[in-house]
């Protein structure tokens, strides 16, 4: 069970907005790069986000280039999960591989700043602020284990292979 605040974004948030290209020189310094997460979508994001908070977005989150750093710096900034109407396929896969849950759901009833409670196993979201309950479907067991272990590499180090 996760609890945190919603940081609401619109449709079409690209990997260039998540990690602006002008900071590409920081790819070898991930803690420094994470200080610029979401900067072009919301310049104050990193200064306001707290560990355990959530990004809540519209359609097609993470579109653009396949920058693996994009979900990683979001996670390093403290975000516990991303909720969106839809997500670019490669962003989704990169996020799961890095241990960052991406939940596909209708985000229209969630407002910026709402307090949310998420149960990954049950596939449920409770917006504590307004009482709205949402679902995001069942996450496959193997993905839950990968997320629980902190990502694919951590899972493989712990278990040795993908025990489907």
Image (cartoon, grey):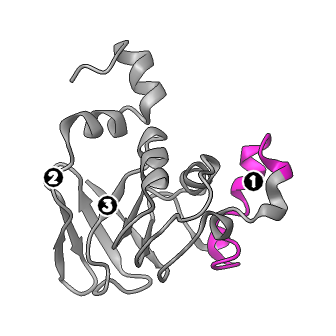
Q: Give the mark nearer the N terminus: 1 vs 2.
A: 1
In front of the other: 111 or 2 = 111
Q: Residue at x 64, y 48 (%)?
A: 69
Relative to 104, residue 30 above or below: above
Residue at the top extreme?
160
- Tell me the number on the disc at residue 103: 3
At which x and y percent is residue 86? 36, 69
Q: Is residue 19 left or right of residue 5?
A: right
Side (left or right) of 7 relative to 30: left
Which type of secondary structure does the marked residue at label 2 adopt? loop
Residue 38: in magenta span: yes
Is residue 138 depicted above or below 105 in this figure? above
Q: Secondary structure at mark 3?
A: strand
Q: Within 10 angstroms of label 3, few (less than 14), some, or many (20 or more) residues?
A: many
Marks 3 & 1, CB-CB < 8 Å contact: no
Choose the circle earlier in sequence order: 3 or 2.
Answer: 3
Choose top left, top right, bottom left or bottom right for residue 125. Answer: bottom left
Q: Which residue corresponds to mark 1?
A: 33
Q: How many marks?
A: 3
| Residue 127 rendering spot, x and y as whole percentages | 25, 77
For disc 2, the marked residue is: 138
Q: Secondary structure at mark 1?
A: helix
Asked whether, in this view, residue 122 is left or right of residue 142, the answer is left
Q: Are marks 1 and 2 in contact (CB under 8 Å)?
A: no
List x then y, in percent, for residue 4: 39, 66
């Amino acid at each position: 069970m996760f609890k945190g605040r919603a940081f609401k974004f619109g449709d079409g948030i690209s990997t260039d907005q998540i990690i602006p290209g002008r900071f590409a020189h920081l790819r070898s310094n991930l803690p420094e790069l994470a200080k610029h997460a979401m900067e072009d979508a919301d310049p104050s994001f990193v200064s306001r986000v707290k560990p355990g908070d959530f990004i809540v977005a519209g359609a097609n989150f993470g579109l653009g280039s396949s920058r693996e750093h994009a979900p990683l710096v979001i996670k390093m900034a403290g975000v516990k999960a991303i909720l969106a109407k839809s997500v670019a396929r490669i962003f989704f896969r990169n996020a799961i591989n890095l241990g960052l849950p991406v939940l596909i759901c209708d985000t229209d009833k969630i407002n910026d700043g709402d307090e949310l409670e998420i149960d990954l196993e049950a596939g449920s979201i409770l917006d504590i602020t307004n009482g709205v309950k949402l679902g995001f479907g069942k996450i496959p067991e193997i993905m839950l284990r990968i997320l629980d272990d902190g990502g694919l590499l951590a899972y493989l180090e712990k278990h040795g292979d993908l025990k489907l």
